[in-house]
Image (spheres, rainbow, N blue to C red):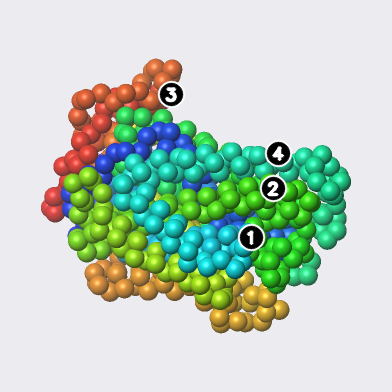
Amino acid sequence: MNMGAKEDCSDAEKLSSEGSEPASLRQSIKPRHVFMISMATGIGTGLLVGNGKSIATAGVGGTLIGYLIIGVMVVCCMQSVGELVVAFPSLAGGFNSYGKKFIDPSLGFCVSWLFCLQWMVVLPLELVTASMTIKYWNSNLSPSLFVSAFYILICIVNFFGSGGYAEAEFIFNCVKVMVLASFIVLGIVIITGGLGNSGPIGFQYLKTPGAFNTNYNVFKATAGTLVNAAFSCGGVEFLALSAAEQNRDNMPKSIRRACRQVSIRMFVFYLLSISVVGLLVPYDSPMLMGSGSDTTHTSPYVAAIALHGVRIVPHIINAVILIAVVSVANSAMYSSSRTLHSLAEQNFAPRYFALLNKHGQPMRCLVVSAIVGLISFIAEYRDQEAVFVWLLSISGLSTIFTWTTICIAHIRFRNALKLQGQSLDTLGYRSNTGVIGSYIATAINVVVIIVQFWVSLFPLENNGKPDAVKFFQNYMAVPVAVLLYLGHKLYTNDWTPWIRTHCVDINTDRDVYAPSDDLSTKGVVKLAPAVQSARSIASSALSESPPEPISQKAHQPERPSSGS
């Protein structure tokens, strides 16, 4: 396509891909860190604690259906984000900039701020959960004592930079992977009667009381598990958030590997582990959160072992759950600070937060995240579980908005490539699920938002009658999103609904790869020092063979002038 065709683009459309030259974050994250981030980062409160309420409400059958639906969406979404992050590794703001660049600046503003607020909220949420987890051992200990210890630890790790975060996450995630795998094996041994005092359990809890909680509307109860499932899966997108701090030489290879691991993560650590819990814990167990019992602070994974008379092991699992929760809190401080920094780079937040210290750290943003983390001292509050539910629900829907934006951005990127005459062979990594996967993931996310509206307005706990408190408790992210979107539209006085496809800038900040006949490298070789523009490579990439990256453009190519 003739680049002159962009002459009819509005000023807002031309500015959608422009921003200030970003200061460089230090590239301290290695391929092994990326691998473990994709495997286990984000596994914490939602899966290990919040699932107790899902199983108590919907049964293990309903919970598994919810996770299966969200799992399909996550796999498709991660393929999309993998393609985009390899194409635009140096884009200021990472995937938080996709909405602004490919769809609409106001949508980008809205979703980026939601993502930032989400992870700022998750930090105190996880620290509160840590204090709840401690109560398994002693309910008389002061929660503030442990919150203080974990808070200080997380601050120290993050103030050492991305290298400190990555190493801590690598260790935390290794522990989570090993223990979850061990739990699955141990659970199977207990189910078959090889351990514990219950004898062979088999599938007896699927018969009595059953796989689904028939005390509620089964369909509505199953639909109600979707938001917690989404929250539980949050964190897989961190491999894209950390792109600016990853080693560029091996990025296509490490991202390809990481995207492949997401499928393993969803099947083993989510679907398989929940199945084992469901076979060991009936949905009417008083140990599950949401059952109304005084012991509802217990993780369903701990209950799965403790109910069958196995000693010591529940204490080990509870300790690992504590590590997992602290791990997510660590990720929350990292992601919220980096997102605030990206907002400033996009001029969506004060430029004060765009500045880095001499070590390439967004120290000012870290201070803000640390201040928000002080909310965690609500752990002393008597009704801390009610606060837990509020924070969990707000975070869950925010995740859905982020994933939806990523998938729509991928669709717009592919459409722009086609319209502007650029070959898919110029991509360093191509989504295995293609545009169809992005459409599927978007459709699932839209259904989740609609279903959550229904479940929130007519909650199960109120016999299906409208409940304003429950509605705002579970749907707060939607009105916040609307206010952010309309507020930005009013501020900019730009009511264009979206950037037209031929106006989408797919050249700025893009790394372009040329095709090669060498299949042995699977398109991944060391980048050559030659510097070429995106346009020149794209126009010369006529071969149909698989892509092999042979050159990388400068991170900040010539930006289109206001008259282009």
Q: Residues within 10 Å of mark 1 (few under 14, many from 20)?
A: some
Disc 2 marks a residue whose amino acid type is Ile
Q: Residues within 10 Å of mark 4 (few under 14, many from 20)?
A: some
Which comes before the other along the chain, label 4 or label 2?
A: 4
Measuring 40% from the left and 53% from the top, which residue is drawn there? 153
Look at the image and tell me whether residue 166 can be seen.
yes
Residue 522's mark? 3
* Residue 274 in the figure: left or right of residue 350: right
Name the mark nearer the viewer: 3 or 1.
1
Q: Mark 1: which secondary structure?
A: loop
Pointer 1 residue: 136
Query: Separation of disc 1 and disc 4 at Cα?
Result: 23 Å
Which comes before the other along the chain, label 3 or label 4?
A: 4
Query: Separation of disc 4 and disc 2 at Cα?
Result: 16 Å
Q: Mark 3: which secondary structure?
A: loop
* Residue 455 in the figure: left or right of residue 188: left
In the depicted structure, whether residue 389 falls above or below residue 78:
below
Q: Mark 4: which secondary structure?
A: helix
Name the mark nearer the viewer: 2 or 3.
2
Which comes before the other along the chain, label 1 or label 4?
A: 1
Q: Mark 2: which secondary structure?
A: loop
Pointer 4 residue: 185
Pointer 2 residue: 312
Which comes before the other along the chain, label 3 or label 1?
A: 1
The image position of residue 432, as x and y in percent, is 50, 36
- Mark 3 touching mark 1, by CB under 8 A? no
The image position of residue 491, as x and y in percent, is 25, 72
Disc 1 marks a residue whose amino acid type is Tyr
Disc 4 marks a residue whose amino acid type is Val
Measuring 55% from the left and 72% from the top, which residue is drawn there? 384
